[in-house]
Image (cartoon, helix red, strand yellow):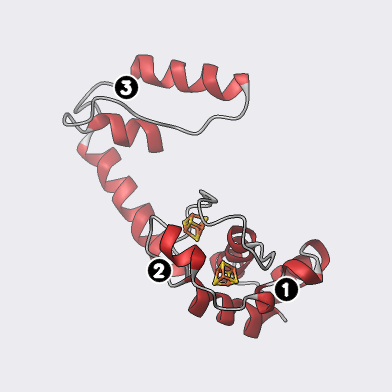
Amino acid sequence: WALRWVWNDPRVGVVLSGMSTMDQVRENIETARKATPDSLTHSELATVEKVKEEYKKRIKVNCTGCSYCMPCPSGVAIPTSFDFFNDAFMFDNVEDQKEIYLRLVKEENRASRCTECGRCEELCPQSIEIIKNLKEVSALFE
Ligand code: SF4
Ligand code: SF4
């Protein structure tokens, strides 16, 4: 759906999609074969719009997980921290996400290890206020 939505725009000539397995390459090629500009119906586009609004309502940090901000010199697992943080609100379940965060993210990689050097914010293509958001992650989970 996401790739079909991008290809639906007639101004788009090339889609760059991160792929890590051969299966993903095959799947993307298959999708690209079917996708043509203006091929999504009004009802499909309205569904995408509705889903987008639902996500926006729930997600706290607009992190795409690109990892351009990594590695953090202080070892903070930036995208992973935001992932658990967003899931806590996405699934309305802070306790479970907190437990998973504390179990999977080692102490030396947790949000509270941020020294506010600012390096990551210069690198983030989404202009996320990483330092401020990490403080919120730390307050909620740690
Ligand atoms: S601001 Fe914090 S999270 Fe960002 S690179 Fe510096 S120490 Fe790491
Ligand atoms: S660079 Fe920004 S969008 Fe990408 S993983 Fe880091 S915080 Fe998230």
Q: Are marks 3 and 1 in contact (CB under 8 Å)?
A: no
Q: Amino acid at mark 3?
A: Ala
Tell me which corner region of the image, top left, top right, bottom left or bottom right, holds residue 1: top left
Q: Amino acid at mark 2?
A: Lys
Residue at 32 percent across and 46 percent down: it is 47
Residue 20: percent from the left, percent from the top? 60, 30
Q: Is residue 92 left or right of residue 6?
A: right
Tell me which corner region of the image, top left, top right, bottom left or bottom right, holds residue 40: top left
Quadrant for the C terminus, please.
bottom right
Label 3 vs label 1: CA separation?
A: 40 Å
Secondary structure beneath disc 1? helix
Residue 11: percent from the left, percent from the top? 16, 31
Which residue occupies the foreground of this view, 84 or 67? 67
Q: Is residue 48 above or below residue 123?
A: above
Label 3 vs label 2: CA separation?
A: 29 Å
Quick check: can you spot residue 40?
no
Residue at 29 percent across and 39 percent down: it is 44
Tell me which corner region of the image, top left, top right, bottom left or bottom right, holds residue 17: top left
Q: Which residue is mark 3?
A: 35
Of tags 2 and 1, which is closer to the observer?
1
Q: Earlier in the sequence, mark 3 or mark 1?
A: 3
- Neighbour tally class for label 2: few under 14, some 14-19, many 20 plus, Cα within 10 Å: few
Q: Which residue is mark 2?
A: 57
Secondary structure beneath disc 2? helix
Residue 13: percent from the left, percent from the top? 24, 25
Quick check: can you spot residue 101?
yes
Q: Earlier in the sequence, mark 3 or mark 2?
A: 3
